[in-house]
Amino acid sequence: MQLTVYADGASRGNPGPAAIGASVQSAGGDELASVSETIGRTTNNVAEYRAAIAGVRAAHELGATSIDLRLDSELIVKQLAGRYRVKNAALRPLFAALVEALEAVGPYTVGHVPRARNKRADALANEALDRARGSR
């Protein structure tokens, strides 16, 4: 079963309070699962990676046999394509974890989407940050 994962991380400040959002969708565009949670204080790039990992793992739990991962982070897309090296030491284990999660499912594609086409994942990340701020 092919599933599409839209993922986005958010950090209010860089570093700052951060959260992840991911939407796992069927081929027809129906949302089958979502992730919306805070991840503590970190950078936006770490949040982006953690969102992608969480989304791919959620798709795997649903029985995905292939994944189309969509991100608005050009950095991650280009690192996964081998066009950029992963220079930041903090991102290396996250890069490895994302590749491992993708390969555990089976065939996968990774593509960049404009922020406007990643609204659901962005909203999930920001909702988590808003919930955390409201609970203080």
Image (cartoon, rainbow, N blue to C red):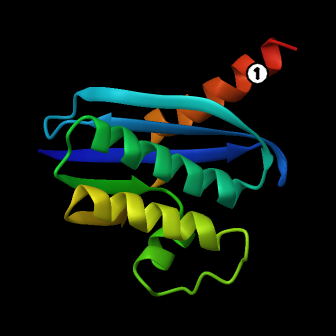
- Residue 29 vs 47, above or below: the answer is above
Image position of 51 (left or right of 59): right
Residue in the foreground of this view, choosing between 99 and 18: 99
Note whether residue 117 is visible.
no
Query: Picture coordinates of residue 130 (x, y %)?
Result: 72, 22
Instruction: Please identify the residue farthest to the right as the structure is shown.
Output: 136
Quarter where residue 75 is shown: bottom right
> Which residue is label 1 attached to?
132
Quarter where residue 36 is shown: top right
Image position of 105 (left or right of 92): left
* Quadrant of image for the C terminus: top right
Q: State the residue at coordinates (41%, 67%).
A: 99
Q: State the residue at coordinates (45%, 33%).
A: 120
Query: Picture coordinates of residue 58 (x, y %)?
Result: 37, 38
- Residue 68 vs 20, above or below: the answer is below
Residue in the foreground of this view, choosing between 78 and 62: 62
Tell me which amino acid carries mark 1.
Answer: Ala
Image position of 106 (left or right of 58): left
Q: State the residue at coordinates (54%, 69%).
A: 95
Query: Picture coordinates of residue 86 (x, y %)?
Result: 61, 81
Quarter where residue 134 is shown: top right
Q: State the residue at coordinates (25%, 63%).
A: 108
* Quadrant of image for the N terminus: top left
Local packing at callout 1 (Cα closer than 10 Å; few below 14, some 14-19, many 20+) is some
Image mark count: 1
Query: Picture coordinates of residue 47 (x, y %)?
Result: 65, 50
